Amino acid sequence: MPKPKPLLTIRLNLLKPQSNPEKLPVKLVRWLLSSGRYLFVAVNAIVLIAFGARFKLDADLASKKEAIEQQIPYIESLRPYEILIRETQLKLSNIDSTKKTALDWPMILKKISDQTPLGIKIININIGKNTGGATIHITGETQSSNNITSFISGLKEEDIFSDIALAGVGLEQETIKFTIDAKSTDSGGKSL
């Protein structure tokens, strides 16, 4: 009988490494030689592009500076116009603020004339503006005291008038002369 052939057996342990693990410096050198060279080439390309762009940007900056220096005399020649425009803007803002804080003279006079009875003759109206509002001083004459009463009650009905008082009454040659004092506020309700 022939001798049996020995069976070929392989003993494989997957948990135990078959060779020594590579050390970190060796892995780093291997990576630098394979993939790192592409990174090195890319970085060098970026540096060269930045170096070339520097010359272009310097040339652009110089041309812009020359263009600005050429415009300086023209801009300086416009200085009187700028001063004039600024003065005009200041005057317009002053006019606007004055207009906003000014009394509405026609409205005040219209309200007084609307409430004046036919028998009253107004001799003088003084309107003075102060910080608390406007003070109105009316001097007039009439033949009847009823006209004065209706005039004062009519002024009291108007919203823009306040503190209405008969300041003085006198009789001269059958004519009653009177003086009325009042304060006024603007129609918007703000104090004048």
Image (cartoon, helix red, strand yellow):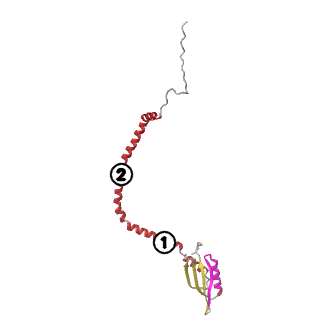
- The amino acid at mark 2 is Asp
**Magenta includes 103?**
no
Query: Front-most of 56 and 104?
Result: 56
- The residue furthest top is 1
Query: Is 1 situated above or below 138?
Result: above
Circle on res. 164: none
Measuring from the top left, give residue 42's x and y in whole percent.
Answer: 41, 40
* Residue at the spot 61% in from the left edge and 78% down from the top edge: 161
Front in this rendered view, residue 118 or 164: 164
Residue 2, position as x, y percentages in the image: 54, 7
Q: Quadrant of the N terminus?
A: top right
Q: Secondary structure at mark 2?
A: helix
Left or right: residue 60 versus residue 13 is left
Q: Which quadrant, please, contains the C terminus?
A: bottom right
Report crowding for label 2: few under 14, some 14 to 19, many 20 or more residues within 10 A (C-alpha): few
Q: Position of residue 45 (x, y in %)?
A: 39, 41
Number of numbered labels in the structure image? 2
Disc 1 marks which residue? 94
**Magenta-drawn segment:** 146-170
Residue 169 vs 132, above or below: the answer is: below
- Residue 92 on image: x %, y %: 47, 70
The answer to which of marks 2 and 1 sits earlier in the sequence is: 2
Report which residue position mark 2 lands on. Answer: 58
Crowding at dot 1, Cα within 10 Å, few <14 / some 14-19 / many 20+, comes out as few
Residue type of the residue flagged with mark 1: Asn
Q: Is residue 151 magenta?
A: yes
- Residue 85 vertical placement versus 158 (above, below): above
